[in-house]
Amino acid sequence: MNVLWRKDTAAGLLFIAIGLAFSIDASSYRMGVISSMGPGYFPFWLGVLLALLGAIVLIGGLRATASEAGALQPWDLKSLAIIVGSIALFGIVLLPLGLIVAIVVLIVVSSKASHEFTWATTILNAAILMLLSLVIFVWGIGLQLPLWPAFLVN
């Protein structure tokens, strides 16, 4: 098996590339110090950590024997299109329909990309993500997002 087409090797290279790209881009912003972080501090170090994680995964992929390493599979373009479409649909329906409905739409549509789709797991995922989103973004951070469709609230 070609070493570059193992899953871990390809994933490690991808992580390194994305991490370095984020770090390089973030270095153009003011960095600051840990006690007074600038806008580039967190993305820079997050990119560095991602690149380090990628290096660890890459080394593991290079050291794996042929029986341990899985071959890189071709992309499932239909599933990829469903995932990207569900994210775009979330952005489109967020303001007019509210966060709760947008999350349900996102989870239901993106779940159709899985070959292991079941309604039970989809409903459970939607419920958990709605609760987490409310706690983190609305109550924790205080983002001003509509929770429900405007026609239901008015």
Image (cartoon, rainbow, N blue to C red):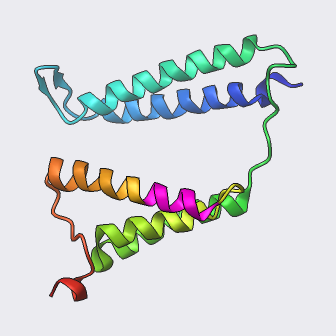
Residue 44 percent location from the top left of the image: 33, 28
Residue 41 percent location from the top left of the image: 24, 28
Quarter of the picture holding the C terminus: bottom left
Image quadrant where residue 70 sits: top right
Region in magenta = 118-126
> Is residue 87 at least partly visible in the picture?
no
In the rendered image, residue 122 lying in the magenta stretch gets the answer yes
Q: Residue furthest left?
A: 36
Depicted 49 relative to depicted 142: above or below:
above
Say which residue appears at 15% left-offset and 63% top-offset: 144
Q: Is residue 36 left or right of residue 77?
A: left
In the rendered image, residue 112 lying in the magenta stretch gets the answer no
Image quadrant where residue 3 sits: top right
Say which residue appears at 21% left-offset and 66% top-offset: 145
Residue 60 percent location from the top left of the image: 67, 15
**Principal secondary structure, stretch drawn in magenta:** helix
> Is residue 124 at least partly visible in the picture?
yes
